[in-house]
Image (cartoon, rainbow, N blue to C red):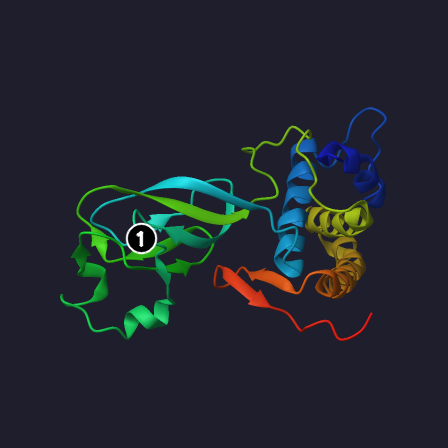
Amino acid sequence: MATISTLLPYLYSRVDESVENGPVFWSQNEATSALMEAMCDLLLLVGRPDMIVSVPFEVQPNTPFQIVPKGVFAVTGLQGPVSEVWKVTLQDLDGAQVAGPDWEQDIGDSITTWAPLGFTKFIVHPSVAQAQTVLLTGIASPVTDMWPYGGSEAVPFHSETFQALEKYAASYLQFKAGGGDFKASMADYESYLADAKRMTALENRRDPFVFSGSVGAQIVANPTTQR
């Protein structure tokens, strides 16, 4: 499997950065971060590769707001001590009848529902008085290492997508250059979006099930009608 360092020379070539004596204008930390951002963005747009992970998670007591653990890109489900916890939306909670003044104040013996809240938090309802361990299922992050990235991190995409990742990263880096260079890099970004659209169409034909980062659950894409 290719690593981030595999793509670095091609990325430097796209931004006209000499690497004979090491990068000058962009540091390696900036370049590896740009490629990491590219992988995260492509995963959001295409919904693949959907690498599922399940990890024990300790629910913090007396608060409904929980922090998504590191290494999890999007939460897709919670398994409680007895059964699976029912997933709802934030709107469902806002419209629910509760025992206290609002759902944020409810405290119970066990969690009955959960709701996604962006990519860094999720909500459990009701809150629990004592710490409780559940099994959290989610989509694994493309890169699980902490910043700064060394370059040995694996790229979990097909080799056909490497050029798309390089285009996004090149546009990302050119923001630092600003002016005409950044404006010119928009062509790379538009080409990246076209590649992502094409990749999505191909993946949908192979696998109609795709996770939705906005709600943290699975949705069904348009069914395959022809080959």
| Percent coordinates x, y for residue 95 in the rendering | 28, 75
87 lies above or below 10: below
Tag 1, which secondary structure? Answer: strand
Q: How many numbered badges does the structure rendering display?
A: 1
In the image: residue 112, left or right of residue 180 = left
Camera-nearest residue between 14 and 119:
119
In the image: residue 118, left or right of residue 86 = right
Q: Going 18% across and 60% down the picture, which residue do you hit?
A: 106
Mark 1 crowd level (few <14, some 14–19, many ≥20, 10 Å Cα): many
Camera-nearest residue between 183 and 65:
65
Q: Going 68% across and 73% down the picture, which residue do you hit?
A: 223
133 lies above or below 164: above
Q: Tell me the quarter of the image containing the C terminus.
A: bottom right
**Residue under label 1:** 65
| Percent coordinates x, y for residue 174 in the rendering | 73, 49
Q: Going 14% across and 67% down the picture, which residue do you hit?
A: 99
Which of the 4 image quarters holds residue 207?
Answer: bottom right
Which residue is farthest top?
Answer: 21
Which of the 4 image quarters holds residue 27?
Answer: top right
56 lies above or below 95: above
Q: Going 30% across and 47% down the picture, which residue do you hit?
A: 81
In the image: residue 58, left or right of residue 5 = left
Camera-nearest residue between 57 and 10:
57
| Percent coordinates x, y for residue 225 in the rendering | 75, 75
Which of the 4 image quarters holds residue 30?
Answer: top right
Camera-nearest residue between 124 and 197:
124
What type is the residue that disc 1 sits on? Answer: Phe
| Percent coordinates x, y for residue 84 in the rendering | 36, 55
Q: Tell me the quarter of the image containing the N terminus.
A: top right
